[in-house]
Amino acid sequence: MAPVWFSDVRPLIKNGVEKVIEQHQNVDIDPPIQTFHQLSSGGFIDNTEEFSVPTPGDLFDDNDLFDNLYEGEFKEAAQRIYAQLPEPPDDDEYSKTGRIESIERALFKFVGVVLNYAGEMKFNEDAFAAAFDEQFEPRFTDREYSRFLLCLKNTTIEPDITIDLDTSIQGSPDYLGPYGIDTLRIRPLDRLEEVGIATHEAPRTGVIEPIDTLDADRPNAALEIVLHRRRPYREIARDIDDIEISPWERADFDVTPVDVYPWKQLTDVIDFISTSVRRCLRLLCPLGTVGFEKGYHVVPGWESYRGIATPVTFELEFECPSSTTGTHITEDRAIEIPRFWSTHRRQLVPDHSKFQNPLTRFERMFSRESLEDQLVDCVVGCETTVLKGGSPGGNRYRLGVRTAVLLGEQNTQNWSSERIAKFFKTLYEYRNKVVHDDTSLPDEPTGGDLISVGGKEFVASSFLIRARELYADLIMEYLDLVASEHGSIQDINKSVDSGVLKQSGEIRQELFQSDQN
């Protein structure tokens, strides 16, 4: 955010901009043209179209034009700005006059910024106001707010759905550091954002290229993150990197922001938030592979002001495997997601003391290529949750009994408790075959070598999809129980065992016999 004293020079700058434009609006020079790519409704290959728009302000970046036309309209404003800035270093080789002239030159170039907002060689009051509010900052600060769009992969969303998520999440240590979360929401990308991303992917080229992260036929879902800078960037850089940021590092002064950041801290924050949200979505939608492919930092600019595109300054890379099964966010899920997030957002963060291991194993199932690795990760994850705490019987028996009690009749598959118990005991049995006997899982519908549970046979891939869905059910059940009872996973398991031991001897005997069979 610009310093308060900038309002004192605003009228002077406005008058200077008006004068410069008035003197030179009839300059007989065709303005430069900038090329953009826009998503169309065509097929996968022909999903972009190219169009060009005038950028008259680029004329004012020409040094010769500056030398020929400039007549000192910004001298007073430049002197006031100079007086408010930190003193140059003692060994500064430039004179005070030279420094003021460099500010004047920057203000002259700001005329070009205003013209790009206006779209023509003519002063426009609204365009000046927008340019001043969005762009007029000293070079040594960044913007107060940083906005990111993280494209969701394998995921679509209804065009009128916006899901606002609670922003009060915390890590240990305080991961946010210099930033706080201002906005956190899941929504479709709008047209300007899609054009900005397509333009960033294929800048200034006449080649039509497919944009993998965008789908031209339906709304593209994205996670929007807006971070609020808590302190001036100069203070952040001084504290974190022991760097003194000065506006006098170079001879040429700039009045527009350069969007500088403490890079490691910024990317750590984005990774922290995106991991937490991804876990929330995968637990609620375990059938598909929800994730992020690319993230984009977007800023305000003349392109968005003129309804052309949302400018993208840089991208962040994410890893997410492709999936043949997509996830579609409908109204029902749009209600469920913020409710679950609000309740459990603090347990979904990376390195949470109680849930990091089960959540990590759960997520690894989505990226493992072999079915055997997926199965082992699922069982190991169950061992770090369901098998915590001692009780009579072996691991296979305890896994079946505890999952049956925890999930009961309320689970994704609507299975009975007995079938749940058999499924997880079978899961553990195949884990032993993979780990101890190096057995490959059957994934061909041969009929004689399939995984059988309760009279129903599965190929390994279908069996593991059910395992992933039921594993998500288990984690969500533990999340609810730990949150409501303020206990630990081990406390929950002791309560389960206590309930089982209170049942009749006939039921316990039946469970033991079932395990022997």
Image (cartoon, helix red, strand yellow):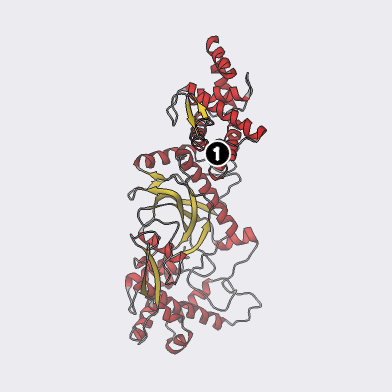
What residue is pinned by disc 1? Answer: 362
In which quarter of the view is residue 243 placed? Answer: bottom right
Give the residue drawn at x 56%, y 40%: 371
- In depth, the one of 38 and 101 nearer the eye is 38
Residue at 51% over, 82% down: 101
In this rendering, is residue 7 above or below 285?
A: below
Can you give x and y, in whole percent of width and height, for residue 260 in the image? 54, 64
Describe residue 161's horizontal placement relative to residue 261 as left or right. Answer: left
**The C terminus lies in which quarter of the figure?**
top right
Residue 439 pos. (x, y %): 62, 35
Crowding at label 1, few (<14), some or many (≥20) Cα neighbours within 10 Å? many
Residue 421 visible to the viewer: yes
Residue 12 visible in the picture: no
Q: Where does residue 441 sit, x and y in percent of width and height? A: 57, 36
Residue farthest toward the top in the current orientation of the protein: 505
Extreme residue in the bottom direction? 68
| Residue at figure coordinates x 54%, y 68% from the top left | 140
Instruction: Tell me if residue 378 comes above or below residue 74 in the rendering.
Output: above
Relative depth, front residue between 76 and 317:
317
